[in-house]
Image: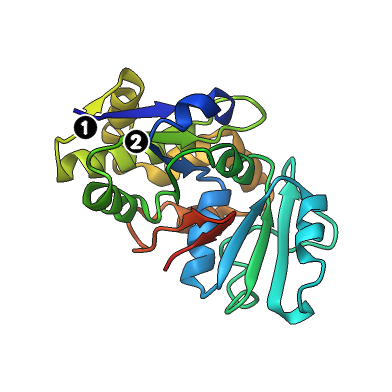
Amino acid sequence: MPKLHVLLKKEEIDDAKMQEDKTAVVFDVLLATSTITACFWHGAKEVVPVLNGDEALREANGRAVDSYCLVGEYNGKTIEGFLDPNPLQLKEQIHGKTVLLSTTNGTVAIRKSAAAKKVYTASLLNGEAAANKIAADHREETIIAVCSGSGGEFCMEDLYGAGYFVDCLMNNTDNWELTDSAKAARIFYRSNTEHAQIILKDSRVGEMLMRNGFEEEIDFIANCGLIDIVPWLRGGKLVIE
């Protein structure tokens, strides 16, 4: 029986172990993977996760000016000259374009997970769709749910998102053996199924976003199962086809 494991922060990623026919599902609920899901929902062509603003500018070099958007933050502050990685504010600006996305934690976690056989990104918005995709296409593989965390620390909202994904998956099938971390994530989610907004707003990152006036964004991100889109990493780019 394959295993389902949850890593509590991106610093726990082991490249060698990731290469052993594992599938990764990356969570950065506030905000990167929620923003990625929303970007595709709003019609983005693709999302390129980069490690920092400098790499984003290198990726932009040589592209037609109207073909891409630079989107990014570092340590919670929007990078100068970039759009804020906010899932609601990007709606009118990214349709049909490549999004070059740099975030402090989420895009780094995606890149660190790239050694896996396949990498998906998920959030509360598309956690059920991600679970359905895993159940349909990866039943023989070990699944690693990667919580990005923040600044080397565990993030409560990522564990909640991973728990939602685990719960959706195990309600679909009992194909996987859960490790203790996966069981803990599921128990945390099931103990708070009606409290997504509270969990997100009470988290450390959520409190920072609330202080900066992003309550509407958090309320949107807390919509479990709203979006039936599962981005995956292909050739360094997140796509949905």
Residue labelled with disc 1: 176
**Kind of residue at badge 2:** Ile
Quarter assignment of residue 69: bottom right
Query: Which quadrant is the N terminus positioned in?
Result: top left
Look at 24% across and 44% down and name the residue there.
168
Look at 43% across and 42% down and name the residue there.
117
Does residue 128 appear left or right of residue 198 in this picture? left
Q: Nearer the viewer, residue 126 or 178?
A: 178
Residue labelled with disc 2: 143
Q: Nearer the viewer, residue 222 or 213?
A: 222
Q: Where is 18 relative to 105, above or below?
A: above
Q: Where is 45 relative to 154, above or below?
A: below
| Relative image position of residue 142 (x, y in whole percent) | 32, 33
**Kind of residue at badge 1:** Trp
Quarter assignment of residue 25: top left
Quarter assignment of residue 208: top right
Q: Which mark is residue 61?
A: none
Query: Which quadrant is the C terminus positioned in?
Result: bottom left
Look at 46% across and 25% down and name the residue there.
17
The crowding category of the residue bearing disc 2, from other C-alpha atoms within 10 Å (few below 14, some 14 to 19, many at least 20), is many
Q: Where is 178 relative to 22, above or below?
A: above
Does residue 219 appear left or right of residue 184 in this picture? right
Give the alpha-carbon distance from disc 1 to disc 2, as whole Å. 9 Å
Does residue 148 appear left or right of residue 175 in this picture? right
| Relative image position of residue 11 (x, y in whole percent) | 59, 25
SS at badge 1: loop
| Relative image position of residue 164 (x, y in whole percent) | 32, 41
| Relative image position of residue 175 (x, y in whole percent) | 16, 36
Q: Where is 2 relative to 123, above or below?
A: above
| 1 and 2 marks in contact (CB < 8 Å) | yes
Look at 48% across and 60% down and name the residue there.
37
SS at badge 2: strand
